[in-house]
Image (cartoon, rainbow, N blue to C red):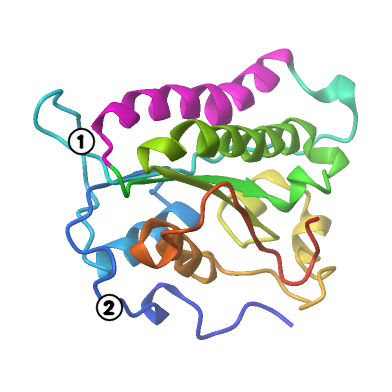
């Protein structure tokens, strides 16, 4: 089984759940971020924000979805610079983005982090990536408690094997050929299959969801 033919970007039909919400999506050029940006636009969110003016701009939704991973068969193969870059991309950047955005957020705003099934079931060949995904889930849980009194919700999405440009670009050919076949549903997911969860967490439909790590893993459990 391979990805469903009906789960591409055009399969998502919006209904205005994010009308007027000012959103910042990090990593929206391709893959999951692109699918989320398209879904938010179809829900009538104001997606493109290029800067923040201290007294004028607002941020209703911040999606942290930066993407980087490399596959290594041993610890010695991982360059020090790659370890530092991976944490800078996923964790340090998220910290600074959240810190900059929160002063512009009002009650009802939402922050969403992109975690992974690797936060619970780390792949040994993706050690730096897996460690950052656990850190994202942990940081979001902390933020949910810190920002809850202000009415700002924070959640993370733990995805299973999702077919993005990173997969063929960073994995050996034999792993690419079998990617996603070991989950109960028997196939990798498409980025568009994650988008509805990001819409839920950003919209008023998710008004009582905070501090959660939502699993979209094709049946692979996260406990």
Q: In which quadrant of the rendered image does the C terminus lie?
A: bottom right
In-front residue for pair 5/112: 112
The quarter holding residue 2 reads bottom right
Label 2: which secondary element: loop
Q: In which quadrant of the rendered image does the N terminus lie?
A: bottom right
Above-or-below relation of 46 to 83: below
What residue lies at 88% left-to-right and 24% top-to-bottom? 75
Label 1 vs label 2, nearer the camera: 2
Above-or-below relation of 80 to 187: above
Q: Return the disc, 1 or 2, that comes first in the chain's sequence.
A: 2
What percent of the width, then of the height, locates residue 109?
33, 46
Q: Residues within 10 Å of mark 2 (few under 14, many from 20)?
A: few
What percent of the width, then of the height, locates residue 68?
59, 37
Q: Residues within 10 Å of mark 1 (few under 14, many from 20)?
A: few
The quarter holding residue 148 reads top left
The quarter holding residue 123 reads top right
What residue lies at 66% left-to-right and 35% top-to-bottom? 138
Q: Which mark is residue 160?
A: none
Q: Which residues are magenta?
A: 80-106
What percent of the width, then of the height, locates residue 131?
74, 32
Q: Is residue 27 magenta?
A: no
What residue lies at 9% left-to-right and 31% top-to-bottom? 56
Q: CA distance from mark 1 to mark 2?
A: 25 Å
Q: Is residue 83 magenta?
A: yes
Q: Which residue is mark 1?
A: 50
What residue lies at 39% left-to-right and 68% top-to-bottom? 205
Label 1: which secondary element: loop
Q: Which residue is mark 2?
A: 15
- Does the magenta stretch mainly form a helix, a strand or a loop? helix
């Amino acid at each position: 089984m391979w990805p469903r033919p009906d789960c591409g970007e055009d399969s998502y039909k919006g209904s205005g759940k994010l009308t007027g919400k000012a959103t910042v999506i990090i990593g929206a050029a391709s893959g999951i971020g692109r699918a989320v940006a398209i879904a938010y636009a179809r829900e009538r969110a104001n997606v493109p924000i290029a800067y923040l003016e201290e007294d004028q701009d607002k941020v209703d939704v911040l999606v942290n979805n930066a993407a980087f991973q490399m596959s290594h068969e041993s610890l010695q193969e991982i360059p020090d610079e790659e370890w530092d870059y991976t944490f800078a991309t996923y964790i340090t950047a998220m910290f600074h983005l959240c810190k900059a955005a929160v002063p512009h957020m009002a009650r009802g705003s939402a922050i969403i982090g992109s975690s992974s099934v690797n936060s619970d079931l780390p792949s040994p060949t993706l050690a730096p990536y897996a460690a950052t995904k656990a850190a994202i889930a942990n940081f979001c849980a902390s933020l949910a408690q810190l920002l809850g009194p202000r009415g700002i919700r924070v959640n993370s999405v733990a995805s299973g094997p999702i077919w993005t440009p990173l997969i063929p670009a960073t994995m050996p050919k034999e792993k690419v050929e079998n990617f996603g076949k070991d989950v109960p549903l028997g196939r990798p997911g498409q980025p568009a299959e994650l988008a509805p969860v990001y819409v839920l967490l950003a919209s008023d439909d998710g008004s009582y969801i905070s501090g959660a790590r939502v699993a979209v893993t094709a049946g692979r459990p996260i406990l």
